[in-house]
Image (cartoon, rainbow, N blue to C red):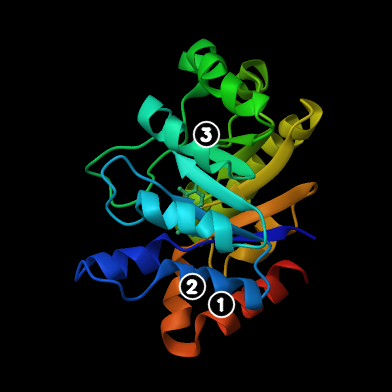
Amino acid sequence: MPLLGVNIDHVATLRQARRGVDPDPIWAAVEAQLGGADIITVHLREDRRHINDADVRRLRSVVQVPLNLEMAAVAEIRTIATSVQPAMITLVPEKRTEVTTEGGLDVCSKHKALRTFIAPLRKRGILISAFIDADTSQVRAAADAGFDICELHTGPYSTANIGRRESEIDRLRLAGEEVVNQGMQLNAGHGLNYTNVGPVAALPHMTELHIGHSIISRSVFIGLREAVRLMRELIQL
Ligand code: PXP
């Protein structure tokens, strides 16, 4: 049964609409934990469009489940990550103009640079995950670079029309098998919601699902604690 990582960036996005203090992502993290979140995730972007440095530090001291910090492979954010010491870091590609993370990290073309980048973080005992497309060559490059975990990008599955869903699941299954064969942990996320999460949760060896937008959206109507509880129930069926 996969664990559920809840991404609370969107709570900070709402706060930044007024640049004030409400709603506080720390309150969101507490509610998510009370709903059964196994992991809390935030993305500290270079442009600080939602989560900021102080949020990450406050979360690190308040959150009682593992904290997963999403970040681009840039030195400035690595310095912050080193001092905060989250349990886990997920490296993602980042573009200033994107609305959300658009594609997976291209590990194939930069696995040597990534190996050097993650080495000091791994030395500190932080687990490092690569957010990649469901592609076996990216998986092998991630193993080569020394990643502990691969998070497979489920965006293409979540936007596929009914006719293509099965082949997207097959792609995820194939890449997932390679992740496990290479001795890494298998995670997945992006675009998962209350109606499409089932087949991804049922993939063999799936360890963690990382979900944000659908849970925060549902929480507007039923509250975050209940929204998390419902999602957890679905992925553990
Ligand atoms: N995993 C990664 C690496 C992401 O960048 C995001 C989006 O921040 C998610 C999971 C969650 O995606 P969504 O908000 O679509 O559930």
Q: Which of marks 2 and 3 is in front?
A: 3
Residue 65 placement: quadrant: bottom right
On the picture, is 101 further left or further right than 171?
left
Question: Crowding at label 3, few (<14), some or many (≥20) Cα neighbours within 10 Å?
Answer: few
Residue of label 2? 28
Secondary structure beneath dot 1 equals helix
Q: Residue 190: x percent and y percent?
A: 50, 53
In front of the other: 44 or 214: 44
Residue 82, label in figure? 3
Secondary structure beneath dot 2 equals helix
Q: Which of pointers 2 and 3 lies earlier in the amino acid sequence?
A: 2
Residue at the image point whose x is 30% and y is 72% from the top? 21
30 in relation to 83, above or below: below
Query: Dividing the image into 4 quarters, which one contains the N terminus?
Result: bottom right
On whether ligand 1 comes within 8 Å of the CB at mark 3, the answer is no
On the picture, is 220 further left or further right than 6?
left
Residue 93 placement: quadrant: top left
Residue at the image point whose x is 52% and y is 79% from the top? 224
Residue at the image point whose x is 36% and y is 30% from the top? 76
Residue of label 1? 31
Q: Residue 162: x percent and y percent?
A: 52, 61
Asked if the residue at tag 3 contacts the one at tag 2, i.e. Cβ–Cβ closer than 8 Å, the answer is no
| Residue type, mark 2 in image | Ala
| Residue type, mark 3 in image | Thr
Q: Which residue lies furthest to the left in this view?
A: 18
| Residue type, mark 1 in image | Glu
Secondary structure beneath dot 3 equals helix
Asked if the residue at tag 1 contacts the one at tag 2, i.e. Cβ–Cβ closer than 8 Å, the answer is yes
Residue 158, label in figure? none
Residue at the image point whose x is 34% and y is 52% from the top? 52
Q: Residue 5: x percent and y percent?
A: 61, 59
